[in-house]
Amino acid sequence: MSLSILAAEALSGARPAVYWTDSPDAPRPAPSLHGSSRADLVIIGGGFSGLWASILAAERDPNRSVVLLEAEETGFGASSRNGGFVEASLTHGVANGLRHWPDEMRELLRLGDQNYDDLLAFVASNEIDARVEETGVLHVATEPWQIDELAEYHEILDRFGIPSEMLSADQVRAEVQSSTYVGGLRDPQGMAIVDPARLVWGLRQVAEARGVAVHDHSAVVGFERHRTDIGVHTAEGSVTARKVVVATNAYANPVKAMRRYIVPVYDYVLMTEPLSADQLLSIGWEGRQGLSDVTNQFHYYRLTHDNRILWGGYDAIYRYRSAIGPEYDQAGDTHHKLAEHFFTTFPQLEGLRFSHRWAGPIGTTTRFTATWGTSFDGNLAWVGGYTGLGVCASRFGAAVALDLVDGRDTELTNLSMVRKKPMPFPPEPFRYAGIQLTRRALAKADTKQGHRGPWLKLLDKFGVGFDS
Ligand SMILES: Cc1cc2nc3c(=O)[nH]c(=O)nc-3n(C[C@H](O)[C@H](O)[C@H](O)COP(=O)(O)OP(=O)(O)OC[C@H]3O[C@@H](n4cnc5c(N)ncnc54)[C@H](O)[C@@H]3O)c2cc1C
């Protein structure tokens, strides 16, 4: 059977829905905001950043009244659509961090490890059933030139005392059976896999238990400056508060300044049915590691608690004028391409079907890491732009945003990563044209043994880029 027919058949029954939230365990939405009220702190956006900001705020000052406003349902955005890789890195990988903040790298690694440990300890102590498995990552090379890239990465990790191990083709195939693998790198620490929706639900529960008033279906449509306060308006209500944290990430609304620095990039995902015992045996994967390949257009994949395979990545699609909407959650071509790649990697799973297909907007910056800003004389702080590594980093992002809005001078607020913003994206139509040009150049580099052409070299010179 041709690969294309195999992919089409496997996709034919897939529900156009997010697997993680397509569950009878999903909680009821929180009541929406009606009427006018007052609070000490309003948080806008109910993803990981907003939830952590609300929990940390209540932890720092239990007497502070906190209101969290979410446009749809808590976790509606990237937070419950992602791959569930919880990685300690705050900098979208050590190599990217070194490129931007060589002098701060050790501090950023330490803070990242601390944030990761604190996150996992919090999940455990609050008995959040997020199906955490500390598996580590396996980076796999599918072309010989990628082995050099892995070796370079191995050296960088070594320099910072982070354990990792180069694997030969035989060794990596002994971990996970795919004839496409020609080598790999085992990166065993600082990485867990979780069920992201269950993490969202658990965080919401803890936040509510600590007195945070969560309101779903309460999109913020605007602000109003009062003398010392900020009026935050939704369609049916308003909250007046001294302080506001905006955690809308890729949605980059309602703060205009965010839109210059953070753009939405759609990332696509497939979920298979559970594998049978024989199918599982045919691929091995006893270590259950999170996997990713090393091309610019990379795939990431992992097992779930019931032995499905989540398979995502490759295309990262930016739409003109930073458009976001449910109409982009399905993309026939991209999902089909992903399904073909799946069966190229695991031909022994022919006959396995996909149960779900979806997408979500990743908020990215030109340096692939979070960025922060303030307005209303420092009484409003915003955060976002973690690119594809925000499940863990969003907790750190929220802590920094709280420090900023509380006017605290801390180790976090003194980091260059926090003080300096990335280069902004240009306005349209240059933004769209530039991103398309970069995507094409990245795809070309993947077919030319990683060789970066003149456009990518120019971007490298300015320390900017495009990633998912
Ligand atoms: C397909 C996909 C796979 C990914 N895989 C991984 C991964 O495996 N590991 C990893 O670390 N990261 C991954 N990421 C990235 C990660 O999910 C995000 O970085 C992280 O969830 C960001 O959380 P957030 O709270 O900042 O943003 P979001 O989760 O996007 O939350 C923003 C919220 O704000 C709400 N909102 C927007 N506008 C308004 C408004 N006006 N008023 C009120 N609310 C508003 C939205 O509805 C949304 O719920 C992935 C992302 C995607 C899309």
Image: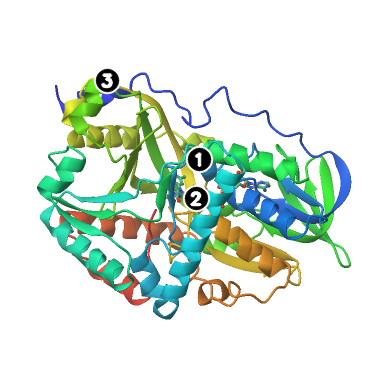
Q: Within 8 Å of ligand 1, the CB of disc 2? A: yes
Q: Mark 3 — residue? A: 9
Q: Which residue is drawn at 70% across and 45% down?
A: 207
Can the viewer see residue 71 in this picture?
no
Q: Residues within 10 Å of mark 3 (few under 14, many from 20)?
A: some
Q: Position of residue 358 (x, y in %)?
A: 44, 34
Q: Position of residue 357 (x, y in %)?
A: 40, 30
Mark 3: secondary structure: helix
Which quarter of the rendering shows the N terminus? top left
Please indicate whether residue 330 sits to the left or right of residue 244 in the image: left
- Cα–Cα gap, marks 2 and 3: 32 Å
Q: Nearer the viewer, residue 97 or 248?
A: 97
Q: Within 8 Å of ligand 1, the CB of disc 1? A: yes
Q: Which residue is drawn at 24% across and 69% down?
A: 155
Answer above or below: position of 399 versus 330: below
Of the numbered discs 1 and 3, the one sitting upstream in the chain is: 3
Mark 1: secondary structure: helix
Q: Which of 231 and 331 is in front in this view?
A: 231
**Which label lies toward us, 1 or 3?**
1
Of the numbered discs 2 and 3, the one sitting upstream in the chain is: 3
Q: Where is residue 399 in the image (x, y as percent from the top left)?
A: 62, 62
Q: Residue at x 64, y 36 (%)?
A: 73
Q: Mark 2 — residue? A: 391
